[in-house]
Image (tube, rainbow, N blue to C red):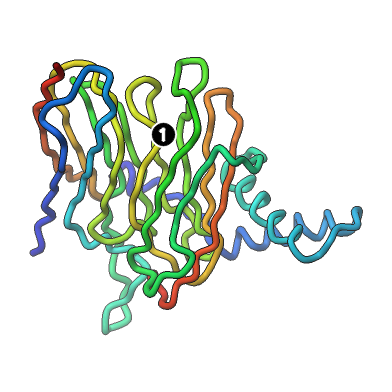
């Protein structure tokens, strides 16, 4: 069984007010539900349908993903450094399973 | 399971039927140039069907994609919206549509004023050469739209 692995690339320090880049990626097949197996049965949809980034428990960025997102969905986005604290990245899969990573950010 | 059950199934057939009907109605009453007007009318009709609002074309929405790409599986996409991102004037979200994909909705990016910049990059699947649409919903409720032509050599949705 293929186990999705989330990864993020985030700076560990930023100046107050600075905008920094976040790269988030999860290895995932993103099965669209449009394909059929060799017996002609529809392969059920199983995608990451939601991504969210929380900054000290406040949602600061999010994405709703649909079938047309590429496999191993990659999302690059930009946050403003407001205070030191914890960044949390959450991926939600069809069926309710979630994958998460946390990252500590120091704002000087 | 919550998300799994509320799939937005906007099929291409339903959309194009609606768009064609809208186009036919318009052509009956108004004499318009056939070539470019019909195309953009389709896009407006599609976005109206999906969002319930009429979008306005805007140069504040920057949608950057390669005009030609060898495969439809991982086509790069970058978004950048001109906005001060204040409480009074910001981008709430940006939706991406691929009207000639079997399922038209691609993604919706949510932004928060003062916390995230209205910029993002990702990779999407395209079934065939088409205009990809980006529709930004602003804090006053207005929809700003931009589109870009992408020619893919293989079907990324098969």
Q: Element type at marker 1?
A: strand
Q: Position of residue B76 (x, y in %)?
A: 36, 58
Camera sees residue A59: no
Left or right of B52 in this view: B64: left
Left or right of B44 in this view: B134: left
Q: Nearer the viewer, residue B154 or A84?
A: A84
The quarter of the rendered structure image containing the N terminus of chain A is bottom left
Q: Position of residue B52 (x, y in %)?
A: 62, 40
- Residue B151 to residue A64: above or below: below
Residue plotted at (58% across, 27% down): B141
Residue plotted at (48% across, 29% down): B91
Residue plotted at (39% across, 59% down): A68
Left or right of B40 in this view: B50: left
Q: Which residue is mark 1?
A: B118
Q: Nearer the viewer, residue B130 or A13?
A: A13
Q: Residues within 10 Å of mark 1 (few under 14, many from 20)?
A: many
């Amino acid at each position: 069984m293929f186990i999705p692995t989330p990864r993020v690339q985030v700076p560990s320090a930023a100046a107050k007010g600075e905008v920094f880049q976040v790269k988030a990626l999860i290895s995932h097949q993103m099965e669209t539900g449009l394909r059929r197996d060799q017996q002609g049965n529809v392969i059920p949809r199983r995608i990451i349908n939601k991504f969210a980034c929380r900054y000290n428990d406040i949602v600061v960025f999010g994405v709703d993903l649909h079938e047309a997102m590429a496999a191993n969905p990659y999302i690059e986005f930009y946050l403003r450094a407001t205070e030191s604290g914890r960044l949390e990245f959450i991926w939600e899969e069809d069926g309710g399973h979630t994958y998460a990573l946390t990252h500590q950010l120091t704002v000087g | 399971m919550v998300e799994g059950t509320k799939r937005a199934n906007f099929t291409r057939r339903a959309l194009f039927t609606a768009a064609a009907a809208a186009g036919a109605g318009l052509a009956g009453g108004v004499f318009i140039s056939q070539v470019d007007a019909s195309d953009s009318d389709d896009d407006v009709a599609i976005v109206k069907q999906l969002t319930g609002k009429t979008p306005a074309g805007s140069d504040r929405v920057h949608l950057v994609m390669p005009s030609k790409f060898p495969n439809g599986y991982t086509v790069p996409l970058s978004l950048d919206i001109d906005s001060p991102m204040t409480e009074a004037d910001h981008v709430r979200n940006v939706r991406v549509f691929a009207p000639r994909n079997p399922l038209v909705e691609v993604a919706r990016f949510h932004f928060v004023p003062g916390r995230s910049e209205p910029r993002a990059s990702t990779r999407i699947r395209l079934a065939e050469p088409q205009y990809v649409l980006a529709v930004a919903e602003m804090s006053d409720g207005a929809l700003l739209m931009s589109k870009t032509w992408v020619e893919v050599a293989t079907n990324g949705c098969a």
